[in-house]
Image: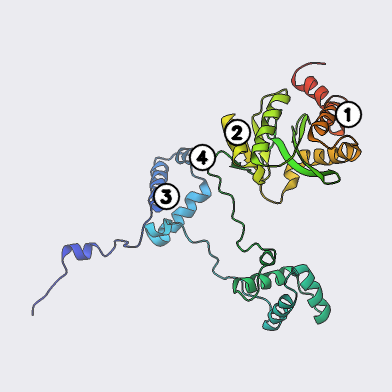
Amino acid sequence: MQIKSLRIKSYRSWHVDERNITEIAKFRFKKLKHFWMLREQQCRESTIFQIIEVKRATIYRWQAAYKQNGLYGLNSQPKIPHNKRKPAWSKQLEQQVLHLRKQYPLWGKKTLTTIINRDRNQNISESTIGRIIKKLVAKGKIKPVCFYYGKLKPKRSRVFNKHAKRWQKGMKSTKPGEMIQIDHMSVFIGPGKTVKHFEATCPITKLTVAQSYSNASSKTAAEFLSLVKKKLPFHLLSIQVDGGSEFRKDFEESCAKEQIDLIVLPPKSPELNGCVERCNRTLRYEFYRFYDGNLDLFSIRQALAGYMNIYNTFRPHQALQQRTPLEYYQRYYQGGI
């Protein structure tokens, strides 16, 4: 009888894990080896985790994954849930939403929820109707509301690849000159006359600079930035604005040239620009409502300059313990008064 055996290379490769091993898995295995080596030398665990710069729970999780699946277990695992949520509504409800939405294409989920609950005598949540509408839009059975307003393409998210940076949670002004809030509003001031009002407010001292313009382009915003830099008694370190087009291009280039950080707030979050929004309201009701001069830009600017002098040096502010912005700045940040 003739006996044949496998080559040495073949049976030695039986225990090799041929599955894909990523660089992340190799990095984690390296950290595990350091952990095992230091533990063999009887180092304290607190010292070990400081040296390898990995948390205790993370190391033990990696160790368990390695014991169960080898190097492959150290790969980043997919975060897709094992049990995906299934639709909790009936086909009949979906057809009813489809029928109503085709009949009234501009009605939203709140209106449709009220009608369906009234007719069916049920308590279906607004979120459920919203999910049904989203599903019907994705399948192409109905059009989104923006389609009927002429917006054929969805709005693209802004790409931050230039000087401007996205606002991060927790960002807050700590001293004068940081995160100066700038905004603009349109003000109807007389028959056929609308001005574009730009305003900059320091959230710490409440010192404010304002100016009226005939348009709200990025070039105008850049011009206003020069005025703000000239008027405020401290150096501009950073500015925060909303995502308006007037704060792009020329304005962004001016900030980069002046080495001023430009922070852009997320959409639909006026509360993050609360100081300047409140100032906008103050000027709309205290200045523009009572303005009765000529409607040319020169006259409006002269009157506005007079009011801003009163606003910063004479008018008490409740947020500053009834002090004026200039008095507050001089007392707490210049050591005066």
Mark 4 to mark 3: distance in Å? 19 Å
* Image quadrant in which you'd find residue 252: top right
Q: Which residue is mark 1?
A: 316
Q: Which residue is mark 2?
A: 254
Instruction: Name the spot of residue 319 as percent of width and height, x first.
Output: 84, 33
Please tell me whether mark 3 sits on a helix, a strand or a loop. Answer: helix
Q: Which residue is mark 3?
A: 28
Q: Earlier in the sequence, mark 3 or mark 1?
A: 3
Looking at the rendered structure, the kind of residue marked 3 is Arg
Mark 4 to mark 1: distance in Å? 55 Å
Please tell me whether mark 2 sits on a helix, a strand or a loop. Answer: helix
Along the viewing direction, whichever of 283 and 100 lies nearer the viewer: 283
* Image quadrant in which you'd find residue 125: bottom right
Mark 3 to mark 2: distance in Å? 45 Å
Residue 323 seen by the camera? yes
Task: Work out whether 219 lies above or below 62.
Answer: above
Q: Earlier in the sequence, mark 4 or mark 2?
A: 4
Q: Which residue is mark 4?
A: 46
Q: Which is in the foreground here, disc 4 or disc 3?
A: 3
Q: Is residue 135 left or right of residue 6?
A: right
Q: Which is in the foreground here, disc 4 or disc 2?
A: 2
Q: Residue at x 66, y 66 (%)?
A: 147
Instruction: Name the spot of residue 317 as percent of width and height, x first.
Output: 86, 31
Q: Residue at x 42, y 45 (%)?
A: 35
Looking at the rendered structure, the kind of residue marked 1 is Pro
Q: Is residue 246 left or right of residue 36?
A: right
Q: Are marks 4 and 1 in contact (CB under 8 Å)?
A: no
- Residue lying at the far bottom in this picture: please name it: 92
Q: Earlier in the sequence, mark 4 or mark 3?
A: 3
